[in-house]
Amino acid sequence: MTDFFGWVILIPLIGAALTILLGNRLDPLVGLATSVLTLGAVFGLALNVWDLGEQRYAIGGWIVPLGINLYADGLSVLMLLMTAVVGLFVSLYSAGYFEPGSDREGWTEKEAFWPLWLFLWAALNALFLSADLFNLYVTLELLSLSAVALIVVAGGARALTAGMRYLLAAFLGSLTYLFGVAFIYASFGTLDLFNLAENIEGTSVALTAIGLMTVGLVLKTALFPLHFWLPQAHTSAPAPVSAVLSALVVKASFYMLVRLWFEAFPQTIDPSAGQFLGILGAAAIVWGAVQAIGQRRLKLLIAYSTVSQIGYLFLVMPLALAPLVDPGSLTPTWSFDAWRGGIYHALSHALAKASMFLAAGTVLYALGHDRIADLRGLAERLPMTTLAFAISGISLMGLPPTGGFVAKWLLLRASISSGQWWWAAVIVLGSLLAATYVVLVLRQMVQRGDEDLELRPVPKVMEVAAIGLAVCSLVLGLRAIEPLEFLEIGGPFLPGTGE
Amino acid sequence: MSQFTLYALASAGLFVLSLYSFITYAHLLRKILALNIMSSAVFLLLINVALRNRGEYPDPVPQAMVLTGIVVAVSTTAFALAIARRIYSSIGTTSLPNEEDLE
């Protein structure tokens, strides 16, 4: 058996270093090779976890508490796979988007993109494999720094301001989280997630700590009303960067929240705290979608759609933590459904949103603008891009046969069976609103436009990458069995253990 | 009141003060400074824990966390300052402009 842990993190790091060292003509080649190899390493790790269950790996042979342990279960493997699949298509797209041989002065967008993107990827992989509170903090910081750098490197007042606002929000969020970690260590003397799960007690210090960590992470995940930094940050960046930020980066802090809430502190957290996050999530779903409907620019519309879709993730907390009416030792089935639905939503949103941002990037590339009112005739001229937008839109609405449907169906089932029909109402309303903003764009695209519309020729790989991701989000809907089974490996809830 | 509680309250006070400054001041340098003071509040708490957990020697784990934390804070500060300078040279303000003003 090979240890894939190291490679999953090392390959993108080595790739990043190579893109700095080698000339920038080779950058797309090195970037693509790195993406393929990383996907391979993640696949290897996934097979190991599939065959043998949860895996632990002590870096350098040093065991806890002196060393750092890496940990992989079904959840981390799915997150890694999501990152690798989105990552591969983003790299493919970027190979066309940042055309070789542009000779601008200084450290250009194109030169900076590859190393920063691969560093970001390495940070994401390290985060998904971390199992202690402090390591999670460090990897989250690495992630934020590379994400902000990817935004500001585009230059210009808009990108700089958006990047600065993002950096300040991210810095504040991580410090709040770290303050909570310090309190946890002060009370329980451990940072390891699983160690903590056994030792934690519901003292007032522990509850304060959980509160601080949650607020910090919620700010980083851009849950309403702390989403103020997201729309500008995600739209000022070049297309591949927007895709990565919306699809993957916000999921990292959400992943940490899920780990903390369901694995480290499940006995300590009061269900009413979950209800509170659920209410914020519901507000996000409605507010984000209404804002999206009112946007005039395509990229901003998609960014507000992210604000809305993030809301769904937070419905997991009230649904999975809903207690049994007749409390017993059994896990209610709705906890299992809600947890799987939430994670599945994270996966399918990643694929659909990345595809959508890449398609929007192609539109911007070809037309030179992304005003929704002037998208007429695009379906004829860029049929593949329009199709990618349509398929990913269907996944966001949650219609079959897409991944979004599976996720929303599980969440709906959880809300009905736990007797909380109001969350079901929000989910359905959110889908209707999503249908509205997707159709508003598609209606423009399929209208007959000017015959002599001047389009900048689009490299084929860009269109292929967007449609590839859209197809993946269909596959996630058609073959949901394996991913869902992965979630049982080391998951906090097991199937069939309760009524 | 034990020494530990005193220091813990001091770091909580420092945290709240810096949060207040971060929210109320628009000047970017002030915001960045506020976040640095906030880091100090966190580090103070951690060092405090290291001191309390000492047997023969202070607990090394929180000290390692502070060291790493300082590295992270320094690099984030440097990066934030660099962006603040770029903002000043490109639009001539020392605070973040409203989105509408950038149209």
Image (cartoon, rainbow, N blue to C red):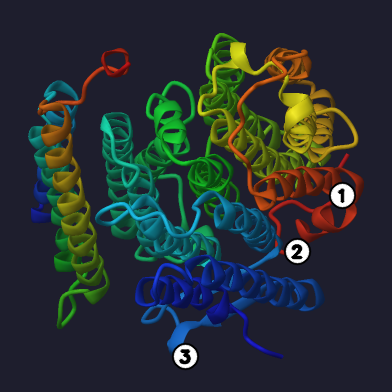
Q: Earlier in the sequence, mark 3 or mark 1?
A: 3
Q: Nearer the viewer, residue A273 or B33?
A: B33
Under mark 3, the amino acid is Gly
Identity of the residue drawn at 60% across and 14% down: A374
Q: Is residue A373 above or below residue A230?
A: above
Q: Chain of mark 2?
A: A
Residue A138: x and y, percent? 35, 61
**CA distance for labels 3 and 2:** 24 Å
Determine whether label 3 and label 2 are within 8 Å by CB: no
Q: Earlier in the sequence, mark 1 or mark 2?
A: 1
Point out which mark residue A480 bears. 1
**CA distance for labels 3 and 1:** 37 Å
Given this view, does label 3 or label 1 mark the residue nearer the observer? Answer: 1
Instruction: Give residue A415's quadrant in the image.
Output: top right
Under mark 1, the amino acid is Ala
Mark 3, residue position: A61
Point out which mark residue A489 bears. 2
As helix, strand or loop, the secondary structure at mark 3 comes to helix
Under mark 2, the amino acid is Ile
Residue A137 visible in the shown view: no
Q: Nearer the viewer, residue A144 or A188?
A: A144
Residue A48: x and y, percent? 74, 78
Neighbours of disc 2 within 10 Å: few (<14), some (14-19), many (20+): many
Residue A357: x and y, percent? 60, 36
